[in-house]
Amino acid sequence: MLHNKIFLALFIGGAACTRIYLNTTTTTYVTATHHPTPRPSYPVCRNGTHCGGVCGDGKVQPPYEECDLGPKLNGAPNSGCSNNCKKVPCCGDGIVEFPEECDLGPRNGEPTSGCSKDCKKVSYCGDGNVEWPEECDIGSLNGKLDSGCTKECKKTPVCGNGHIDAGEECDAGPRNGAYNSGCSKNCTICGYCGDGILDTPEEECDLGWQLNGAPGSKCSANCTKVDIPCPPTCGNGVVDPGEQCDYGSSNGTPGCKCTINCTWIQHPVCGNGITESPEECDDGDLNGTPSSKCTKTCTLKEPCRSPKPAVCGNGIVEYPEECDNGYLNGTPGSNCTKTCTKIISCTSSCPKPQCGDGRIDYPLGEECDDGAANNGKEYSSCTADCKRKTKPTECDTCNPNPFFNKCTITTSCISAPFGTEKNYCACRAGYRASGLSAMDPRQFRLPGFVGQEYRVFVAPGVDCDQLCDNPHPGPDSCREVPVRAGCV
């Protein structure tokens, strides 16, 4: 015998839903013949008896029926059971089943629930989505102070965002409420120095922005009293009429360019951070410290010359240059060679050109000349007989000494991890030699240089202003420039 336990539960909320809970035993079924209308056919029981039951009799006959609420409820709206005893979605049972878009059970249809009584999604103020007719919607922040959005999803001014919104008189952002900002914390205009209104105790006077600080005015630009003709105002931090400068209590102190009389110091001031002739350097308060190249007396530490390498051709005479006429160097009429050495109009008494005179005498076959005192030395790229130590077809090295490395301003002389003399002029990341083909031997990449495999190296004197085909640093950068294993 088939035993069924049927429990019917009605849920209130949107529409009534009938939920079915079953406990059944396993058996087989026969075709029911006692119902006057056609019903589904079920198998015959093993003992030959009629198992009974048809769709609509209120009894669930698995596996052929999923539910059975009887003839009145089967197929009724939101009953959960169809006319042919199959389960269907029930709006209001709290379970989202296709084609339902949502189902919150008894909360369906409530304001701000987001779900209608017929289980369709609906927007509401506070869901974080701006949908017409909402002007804004920032979810749980709606209605908060200065959120910009009310609980009804209407825009409101935001005091403190730096923009003058509708309803605000001013908005100075984070300076709202600070003196001299001109704007209060609630974005209404308030007093400030220059508005012609005396705001005590911050101001001693205020004649308006047109008169404050004007010549002869008794009120300074920062709203402090100015007594004319006395007492003197030098030292109040305001440049008043008759003063050249005024740094307040700093006037006359070491490093300050302003005297105690509020006049500019005309001679160099060691310690003000400005290198003024005849100073060799000035790093301000760093002078004399281990991190500075400058002594407390504004002279360079060893070496005694500027560590910045001279750039021949920039029009500035920098040690060890003898002259520099910029682009005119080496041209007819110029008294300066292309290597920034002076051209002397010689008579028969002038010394003859020779290796070691510091000038590259090409007719004599010289390739370089760093002077007799430097040629052939370890730091020079020139041999004692004025020949380059390396040829352009080889890996032309540079000298780490900034006075002799000859790397251009677009490159820097760095040491490669392949020996003490493997120093090369390195281009900036993503750049290669200007005006040279990618295969030119005067530029190359180095294998095994960890972290610098993409870097392009060039011969001294070569500029690097040409972007590589792939200028982004990485394994594929500047791949058009060949790797030269012979350089390591």
Image (cartoon, grey):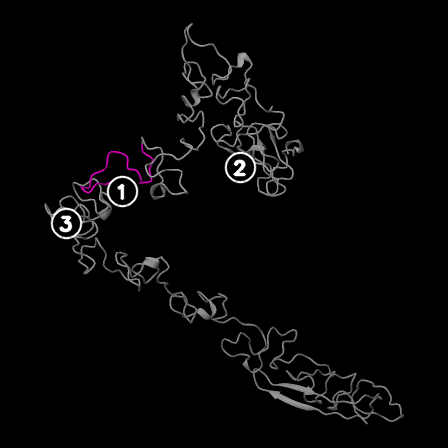
Q: Going 50% across and 30% down the picture, which residue do you hit?
A: 408
| 309 vs 451: above or below | above
Report the residue at 46% width, 71% height from top. 140
The region drawn magenta spans: 254-276
Magenta: main secondary structure: loop
The tag on residue 226 is 3
- For marks 3 and 2, give the CA distance: 56 Å
* Element marked by disc 3: loop
**Residue 41 % position (x, y):** 83, 85
Which three-letter amino acid code belongs to the residue tagged 3?
A: Val
Q: Which amino acid, mark 2?
A: Arg
Mark 2 element type: loop
Residue pictured at 21% horizontal, 51% vertical: 222
Q: Which residue is mark 1?
A: 254
Question: Distance from label 3 to label 1 (Cα)?
Answer: 27 Å
- The numbered disc on residue 428 is 2
Q: Is residue 160 above or below residue 126?
A: above
Where does the image place residue 191, in percent across and percent down from the top left?
23, 59
